[in-house]
């Protein structure tokens, strides 16, 4: 009995840390649009901003890639998959979708990712899904519909919706792939190494897609306007690279390892709420009553989801220890 209590307490602490990391990741990811929009309005193409973001993060993480170079031999499929889906896929599909359908609709479809994760866990991995996680997803998606005010941009473009659904599948891949190997103990692939190589793969793919040789490089030497205030473009780019990419991916992947893909996915929905609030505060964009209510509903969904059965791996360890 004492062993059970100790391990249960350790599991709860680990879950608490995971929840804090997931929230931190959502906040970091959510700030990307607020910093990137002034750069785009200053003259940079959206895809070029994405390319700068991923390439910059890949260069920052390059020393970790060298340190964990054994992963290339041990887990090549994981590294390529993470780079293609969790890094390049989400970005490419999302930007392609918003070229055809309203941003709000694209965001809502993309954030069906947590629901796809639940389906993957239940029907592919054949693991039980807790009612709390399912209810959390429903609340989060409903709240997001209000946050992005989907009714103001309803339109039907089959290809645009398919592209947004591709972004959702890639987002689900991010959560599922982040969890790969977490049951292997000391043999688990180091999350920092996975992120480093994923960014390198993503940078290579996005170089082909974005074609940065036609970029307006002089924009980076000037200033961009943030709600009327001039901010150095390099400072905004630094925020996008270091906070909204490096910190966001590191905290996000570690959070998935400590929680589960389905719980971390629901908490990740807060990214859209954070992005909306930051745009209101820093860019002067109006925040309506429906968006405030929607944000509260998303928070409720994240709260419900994180209360789902803790320590999915702990019970096996406790049983083993008891025997």
Image (cartoon, rainbow, N blue to C red):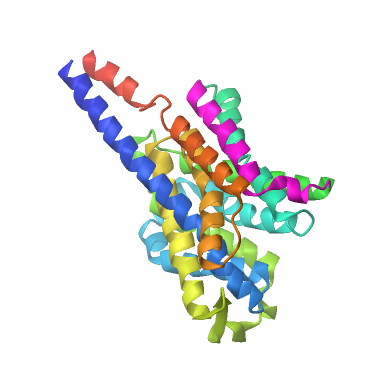
For the C terminus, the image quarter is top left
Task: State the count of labels.
Answer: 0
Q: Position of residue 222 (x, y in %)?
A: 55, 86
Q: Could you tell me which residue is drawn at 68 percent across and 48 percent down?
A: 149
Name the quadrant containing residue 228: bottom right
Picture layout, residue 241 above or below residue 14: below
> The magenta stretch spans which residues?
128-156
Name the quadrant containing residue 206: bottom right
Picture layout, residue 224 above or below residue 320: below
| In the image: residue 229, left or right of residue 216 | left
Q: Could you tell me which residue is drawn at 83 percent across and 45 percent down?
A: 158
Residue 155 magenta-highlighted: yes
Q: Main secondary structure of the magenta part?
A: helix
Picture layout, residue 294 above or below residue 321: below
Closer to us: 132 or 93: 132
Kindly tell me whether residue 265 is visible in this rendering: no
Q: Position of residue 170 (x, y in %)?
A: 62, 46
For the N terminus, the image quarter is top left
Picture layout, residue 309 above or below residue 281: above
């Amino acid at each position: 009995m004492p062993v059970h209590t100790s391990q249960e307490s350790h599991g709860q602490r680990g879950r608490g840390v995971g929840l804090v990391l997931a929230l931190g990741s959502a906040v970091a990811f959510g700030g990307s649009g607020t910093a990137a929009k002034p750069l785009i309005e200053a003259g940079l193409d959206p895809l070029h901003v994405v390319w700068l973001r991923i390439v910059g993060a890949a260069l920052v993480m390059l020393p970790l890639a060298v340190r964990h170079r054994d992963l290339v031999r041990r887990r090549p499929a994981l590294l390529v998959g993470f780079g293609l889906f969790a890094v390049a896929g989400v970005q490419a599909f999302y930007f392609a979708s918003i070229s055809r359908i309203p941003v709000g609709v694209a965001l809502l479809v993309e954030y069906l990712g947590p629901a796809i994760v639940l389906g993957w866990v239940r029907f592919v991995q054949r693991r039980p899904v807790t009612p709390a996680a399912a209810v959390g997803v429903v609340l989060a998606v409903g709240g997001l519909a209000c946050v992005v005010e989907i009714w103001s941009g309803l339109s039907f473009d089959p290809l645009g919706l398919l592209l947004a659904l591709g972004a959702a599948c890639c987002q689900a891949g991010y959560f599922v792939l982040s969890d790969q190997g977490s049951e292997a103990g000391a043999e688990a692939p180091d999350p920092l190494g996975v992120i480093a190589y994923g960014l390198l793969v993503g940078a290579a793919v996005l170089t082909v897609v974005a074609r940065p040789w036609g970029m307006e490089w002089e924009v980076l030497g000037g200033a961009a306007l943030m709600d009327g205030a001039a901010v150095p473009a390099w400072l905004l780019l630094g925020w996008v690279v270091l906070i909204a990419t490096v910190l966001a991916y590191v905290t996000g992947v570690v959070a998935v390892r400590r929680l589960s893909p389905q719980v971390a996915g629901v908490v990740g929905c807060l990214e859209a709420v954070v992005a909306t609030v930051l745009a209101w505060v820093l860019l002067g964009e109006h925040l309506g009553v429906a968006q405030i209510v929607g944000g509260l509903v998303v928070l409720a969904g994240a709260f419900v989801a994180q209360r789902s059965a803790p320590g999915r791996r702990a019970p096996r360890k406790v049983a083993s220890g008891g025997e």
